[in-house]
Image (cartoon, helix red, strand yellow):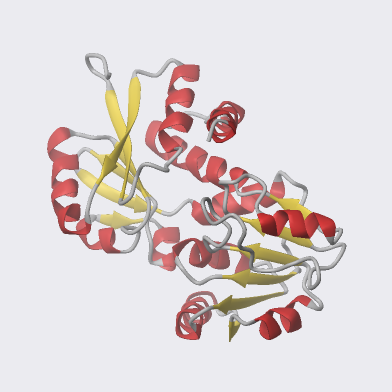
Amino acid sequence: MPTKGSDIYGVIGDPIEHSLSPQMHNAAFKKLGLNCIYLPFRVTRRNLESAMIGMRALNIRGFNVILPHKTAIIKFLDELDEAAQEVGAVNTILNDEGRLIGYNTDGSGAAMALEEQDVDPSDKRIILIGAGGAARAIAFTLARGARSIFVLNRTQHRALKLAKDIERRIGKKILTRSLTRNSLLEALQDADILINATSVGMYPKTKQTVATRKILHSGMVVFDIVYNPVKTLLLSEAEAAGAKAITGVGMLVHQGAEAFKIWTGHSPPVEVMRRAVMKELSGL
């Protein structure tokens, strides 16, 4: 339980039970000796505005935001940082003396996850599967430096909206197609990096994958933002094809570390946060 004078942080979403953010952030607070606690809060859609009123009233210092609130929460905030404005989604909120500021750290978290695995997306041909909040953040972050980004999504209209938003804001043309086996096969022929930004393969549906070894190829990078299980079927198929496989744990940890820095101003203990996540995942 929080002690007297503790700063309270948390994560809001619905459902909330699967979040590993409490373990990750509480380990970081303990490591740095900060008098803070991080708690999960299940908030339904209809109670979202009330939750923001409560955040101000109770002086909760910061929230992470997960599905389904990353977009809907924007209208209850006072300000957005540049990344959140571009993406149109928020995953981090700072309570600055009653002024609620929204941030998006998903894109930078993904970029850092690639960087720590010695993958430079600059001038690379990238295939991005998905067009939801996480996919949008990744697309906006990587689009500026990539040679090309090809967005494949089950419903093409969402991919088209993402492409139009990126072209309007940063002047980069993005290709889109509906996600089918044929469109993926065609896109993968000369792809350098494949990123799965959907929930396909996430526990408990671990036998699902967006691509198999038959259509992946050696020398490419396959990055799956799903972190439970750590090694998804997609990543196993990638390794079997001779591709470099990158798990979703890095993105989870780095987006959390960026939020930690926004809230506290302290340099986040990234490896402590990673160990807390891996310990929890090993017990699931």
Tell me the residue at 65%/52% (across/down): 232
Above or below for 111 versus 208: above
- Taking depth in this image into account, of 142 and 170 the one nearest to the observer is 142
Which x, y percent locates residue 257? 51, 38
State the image quarter where residue 179 is shown.
bottom right
The reply to whether residue 173 is visible in this rendering is: no
Which x, y percent locates residue 197? 56, 63
The reply to whether residue 275 is visible in this rendering is: yes
Tell me the residue at 39%/52% (across/down): 91
Tell me the residue at 52%/60% (across/down): 199
Which x, y percent locates residue 103? 39, 52
State the image quarter where residue 124 is shown.
bottom right
Above or below for 283 versus 120: above
- Quadrant containing the N terminus is top left
- Taking depth in this image into account, of 14 and 136 the one nearest to the observer is 14
Give the mark count. Answer: 0
State left or right for residue 188 relative to residue 15. right
State the image quarter where residue 219 is shown.
bottom right
Which x, y percent locates residue 158? 45, 79
